[in-house]
Amino acid sequence: EVQLVQSGAEVKKPGESLKISCKGSGYSFTSYWIGWVRQMPGKGLEWMGIIYPGDSDTRYSPSFQGQVTISADKSISTAYLQWSSLKASDTAMYYCARLTDYGRTGYSGSYYYWGQGTLVTVSS
Amino acid sequence: SYELTQPPSVSVSPGQTARITCSGDALPKQYAYWYQQKPGQAPVLVIYKDSERPSGIPERFSGSSSGTTVTLTISGVQAEDEADYYCQSADSSGHGVFGGGTKLTVL
């Protein structure tokens, strides 16, 4: 059974750093792109970026380039989303999701498997 | 930046047909996907590659494409279909893009 299990909720202060995780199981972790999606309170879904764990090829939405870092450790089947200096506007639910289709060639497809979400709250 | 446009809300009575549209200039060249999201839950893929239905998704969910608009159709709407629906596609660089979402209300 394919599963994406995300790390727990976080409460941070502005300016602090944070790294949240997404552990994949039940499939070949290195062979599927994993994306990150933001959902601010009461708002819609926003595509942040995506990584291919097999070689750590990473692509970012222009809206999030330079604001976050996406990485992966294939030895432990885990993808990460990190911030170096959080802002209050980073308060949101963050989902990881696995691209439906196998392989490295395209990263613009659908997401069949989703993590349960990690709620990040940034408040002074 | 590339945008996908959805109506903010659609309302239908039980048993009727709901149609949710999504418009974007690149849709003739890129597939569209649809997700259902209920409160407090992660999104669920209900349509992929414009009109394909994943296993386990009821047959009342269907998708179609015409030019720069794709449409999610829910036939015989049930109370359990009340949710937010998002279309997703890609821009010219292959980066993912979501529509703003449509709240489906079952009256």
Image (cartoon, coloured by chain):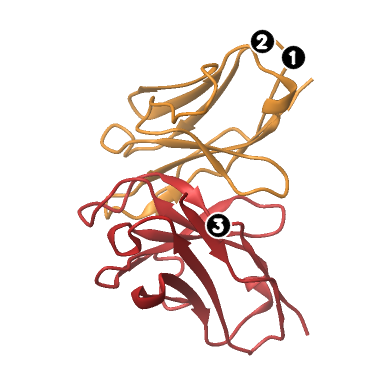
Chain colours: A red, B orange
Residue A115 image label: 3
Looking at the rendering, which quadrant does residue B93 occupy?
Answer: bottom left
Categorize mark 3 by other alpha carbons within 10 Å: few (<14), some (14-19), many (20+). many
Compared to B45, does A73 lie above or below? Answer: below
Quadrant (top left/top right/bottom left/bottom right) for the C terminus of chain B:
top right
For mark 1, name the chain: B
Q: Residue furthest left?
A: A105
Closer to us: mark 2 or mark 3?
A: 3
Q: CA distance from mark 2 to mark 3?
A: 33 Å
The residue at the point 57 percent across, 45 percent down is B43
Do callouts 2 and 1 point to residues on the same chain?
yes
Q: Nearer the viewer, residue A98 or B6?
A: A98
Residue B13 image label: 1
Categorize mark 1 by other alpha carbons within 10 Å: few (<14), some (14-19), many (20+). some
Residue corresponding to mark 2: B16
Is residue B60 rendered to the left or right of residue B4?
Answer: right
Secondary element type, mark 3: loop
Do callouts 3 and 1 point to residues on the same chain?
no
The residue at the point 60 percent across, 71 percent down is A7
Residue B9 in the image, given as x and y percentages of width and height: 67, 31
- Asked if disc 2 and disc 1 are in contact, CB closer than 8 Å, the reply is yes
Closer to us: mark 3 or mark 1?
A: 3
Q: CA distance from mark 3 to mark 1?
A: 32 Å
